[in-house]
Amino acid sequence: MSNNIRDDLPWWKKTTVYQIYPRSFKDSNQDGIGDIPGIISKLDYLQELGIETIWLSPFFDSPQRDHGYDVRDYRSIASEYGTMSDCERLIREIHAHNMFVVFDMVLNHTSDMHPWFIESRSSRDNPKRDWYIWRDGRKPGGRKPPNNWNSMVGGSGWHYDELTDQWYWAQFLPFQPDLNYRNSEVKKEMFDTLRFWLDKGVDGFRLDIIHTIYEDEQLRDNPYAMKYLPSEEDSRSFFHDNIHTIHHRDNFLFVKELRRILDEYSDPERFLVGEVGAPYDILKRYCGDVTNDGRTDGLHMTFQFKSLNTNMNASSIRKLISDFETHFPEPYIPTWVFSNHDQMRRISKLGNDIPLAKLNAVLQLTARGVPFIYYGEEIGMLDHNISLHDAQDPVARKYSWLPRPLLALITRGGKISLNRDNCRTPMQWDSSDNAGFTGSEVHPWLPLEPRYHSINVERQESDMDSLLNCYKTLLQIRKRNPALHAGSMHLHPSNTASKHLIVYDRKYRRNDMVGQSLRILLNLSRTPMEVDRIDSDCVLLFSTHKDTHPLDDRDVILEPFEGIILDIQ
Ligand code: GLC
Ligand code: CA
C-alpha cells in the first residue's frame, strides 16, 4: 500500500479513545486518590499503548458525592486532583504526546453545593431562583410533588425545600439539581464554560446524560408503562413512559446549538460525544441531520450502548454490526463501547476469558466506528465484588437495603452490577502492594481488585501473548491501515456452513490511488474452523493466536475463538 494515501475524514472519526477515571488511575501524592500529576506520569504508557484520544471523567471542583458528576465549579479543579496549572500542563502534555484530550461535561445538573444552587434555594425572588426548576407542590397544601415524574434512579425526582415551600427537580440523585436551560442566562453561562475549556485547548467533550436536558414545560404527568427496570436503550422505567422527562423535543435543538459552539473552533476540529440511552433512531436524531456539505449538524457521535450487553456469539455480534451500519452510515459514525465507569467490565461478563477478550478487542478495533477503551480494559482488569453496604457509589448506597432475592432479580443473577465501585477500582500497574497505584502503606479510596498480582501492566508488558500486547498490536495496525480507521465496512452474510463465523471487509480507496482491502474473520466457536480459501495473494496482518498462518496452498484454519486480519488486496 502506498504511503502517501491520505483520507479526508476528520480526525475524530478515525480516533481511538481511552477513558480515564481520574480518581483511580494513578496517585502521585500518596493520599490514596488518583490525580492529574499521576495521569501526566502515565502519558508515555498511553502513547505507547497507541490510543489517540484521552477522555477524562470529571475532575472539576466538587463535593464528590457522585465522584465528580456533581460539579461545584465548572472552571476550577478539585484540590485532590491538582490545580488549574496542573490541568493546563495535562492538556499541553497530552498534545505533546500527539494525543487529543476530551473533558467530561455535566450540563444537566450541578451539585446542590454549587453557589448557584445555594443562592437559588435561598429565596423565591433570588436572581438565581430560575436557574433551577422550582415548582409548587400539588394542592391541597403543596405537600405532594408537582407531578408524577420519577428520577432516572427511581423514586420521585422532585425534592421539597422547606425554606421556600417549593420543590426542585433532579433527574439523577437529590443532590444533583437540574439546571433550567429555558433560562437564557444559564445557557449563556454553560456555553461560555465550554468555550473556556475549548480556548484552553480541550479537543472535545463527553456530554453526561444529555438526553435529560429539557422537561415538559407544562409539567404533564408521564403515562403508565408496563416496565419496571431501567435499561440502556429504553427510557421507560419504574412503570412510567418518561416521555415528558427524557428525549424532550427541545433536546434535539439544543444539541445543534452545542454543535455550533464546537464549530467555532477549527485546527483541530473539536467533537462531542453524547451519553444517551435510547434506541438507534433516537440516538441518530441526537446526531442531527445531514447538511448540504455532507456533514451532520448535531452531536458528532453518541455512545451506542447496545454493545455493552451483546453476547459473544456470532448471531448477536452480526446483528450488532449490521444495526450499526444500517443506522449510522457515513457521515454518521458508530461507537464501540464495552465498558465504562457505570457498567460491569466486559471481561467479567465474558467470564474472565482471555481468548474471548482478545476476540472482543479485534471486533472493537477493526469494525467501522470509534472505539472507547475503559482504563484497565487493555489488561483485562476484572470487576471487584464490593458489597452495597461498603459502597462509595451513591446509587449503590441508595439500594443497599434491598433484600438478596430482589437484588438477584434486578442484577439478573449478577449479570449486571448495581455497585458502580466494582468497575472503578484502582488501575493495576504492577504486582507490588496497592499495584503501583499508590504507596504500599496508603489506604486507596477503593480497594484493589485482589487478582492484581497476576493482572497488571508490568507483567503483561513482558508477555508477548498478553491481552495488553494484543491491544497494542491491534492499535498499531489500526493506525497504519486506512482501511481500518477510515475505510468502508462490508459485513458478509451468514453462511449456514459456518454460522459461528463473522467475516467483514474494510475497504479504502481514494480517487485513483492504490486502495486497500482487509478482511477480518472471527471464529466465535470452541471448535477449529476451516474457512474458504482466499484466492488472491493475501497476507496475514494479525492473529489473536499466533504470528504466522498457513495461507499459501491451504484453506485458512481458525483456531477456537481466533480472530485474524488479512490483507486481501
Ligand atoms: C452519567 C454518569 C454517571 C453519573 C450520572 C449523573 O450516567 O456516567 O457516572 O452518576 O450521569 O451525572
Ligand atoms: Ca493523590
Image (cartoon, grey):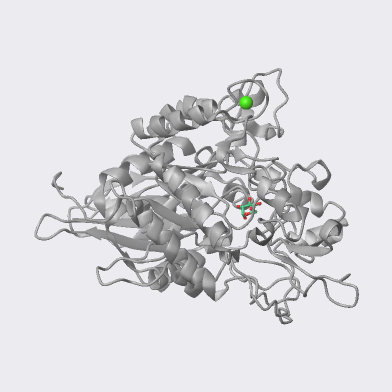
Taking 194 as reference, is 95 above or below it?
above
Residue at image point 37% right, 50% down: 270
Looking at the rendering, which quadrant does residue 142 occupy? bottom right
- Residue 480 is left or right of residue 77, and the answer is left
Instruction: Place residue 51 in its image quadrant.
Output: top left
User: In percent of the image, x 39 and y 54: which residue is there?
Assistant: 262
Whether residue 447 is visible here, answered yes or no, is: yes
Which of these two is toward me, 234 or 540? 234
Instruction: Give the side of residue 61 with respect to residue 15, left or right.
Output: right
Q: Quadrant of ligand 2?
A: top right
Residue drawn at x 27%, y 58% is 487
Vertically, is 439 above or below 263? above
> Which one is nearer the viewer's eye here, 265 or 372?
265
Position in image of residue 53 (x %, y %): 41, 43
The answer to whether residue 561 shows anywhere in this view is no
Residue at the limit of the structure toward the left, as seen here: 512
Q: Quadrant of the C terminus?
A: bottom left
Indicate the position of residue 281 as horizontal and vertical percent values: 48, 75
x and y, in percent, of residue 505 in the image: 30, 61
* Left or right placement of residue 390 versus residue 97 in this view: right
Q: Is residue 304 left or right of residue 169?
A: left
For the residue pair 255 and 436, the one nearer the viewer reads as: 255
Q: So how many labels did they put on this image? A: 0
Q: Is residue 3 above or below residue 416?
A: above
